[in-house]
Image: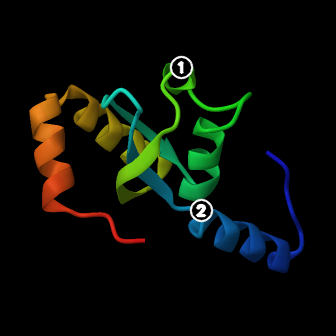
């Protein structure tokens, strides 16, 4: 591990790391299916899902996708655990979650 003598650099890295929140999101694909993922930037990721070269393989053939649900997940680990829990839910349960927490941007 690299030792940094400048306390200011340590502070800047820790602040940047602390501001790097992870989000769990769901997008609805053209065929009505739901895709769940995590990201640090919802709008960048949504653009990637709808772009020609980026985004998940699952969404590439199901464009366009639109954001229907998101929540702040905290750390990457916490977001990944929540993503896993959402992916285990039935589609009916996911639809109820989406309906209970309408997305306002």
Element type at marker 2? Answer: loop
Q: Residue at x 31, y 31 (%)?
A: 32
Q: Quadrant of residue 90?
A: top left
Figure check: 51 above or below 41? above
Q: Looking at the image, is mark 1 or mark 2 earlier in the sequence?
A: 2
> Which label sits in the foreground, 1 or 2?
1
Task: Please tell me how crowded label 2 is: few (under 14), some (14-19), or many (20+) other residues with Cα within 10 Å.
Answer: some
Mark drawn on residue 24: none
Mark drawn on residue 20: 2
Q: How much space separates mark 1 and mark 2, taking CA atoms? A: 30 Å
| The N terminus - image quarter | top right
Q: Quadrant of residue 77?
A: top left
Q: Residue at x 61, y 39 (%)?
A: 50
Q: Are the residues tagged 1 and 2 within 8 Å (C-beta)?
A: no
Figure check: 97 above or below 35? below
Task: Please tell me how crowded label 1 is: few (under 14), some (14-19), or many (20+) other residues with Cα within 10 Å.
Answer: few
| The C terminus - image quarter | bottom left
Direction from residue 8 to residue 20 in the image, left or right = left
Task: Provide the residue designation for mark 1.
Answer: 61
């Amino acid at each position: 591990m690299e030792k940094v003598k400048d306390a200011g650099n340590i502070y800047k890295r820790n602040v940047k790391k602390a501001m790097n929140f992870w989000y769990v999101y769901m997008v609805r694909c053209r065929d009505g299916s739901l895709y769940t993922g995590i990201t640090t930037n919802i709008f960048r990721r949504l653009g990637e899902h709808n772009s020609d070269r980026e985004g998940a393989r699952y969404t590439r053939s199901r464009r366009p996708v639109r954001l229907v649900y998101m929540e702040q997940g905290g750390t990457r680990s916490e977001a990944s655990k929540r993503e896993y829990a959402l992916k285990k839910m039935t589609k009916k349960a996911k639809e109820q979650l989406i309906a209970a927490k309408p997305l306002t941007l």
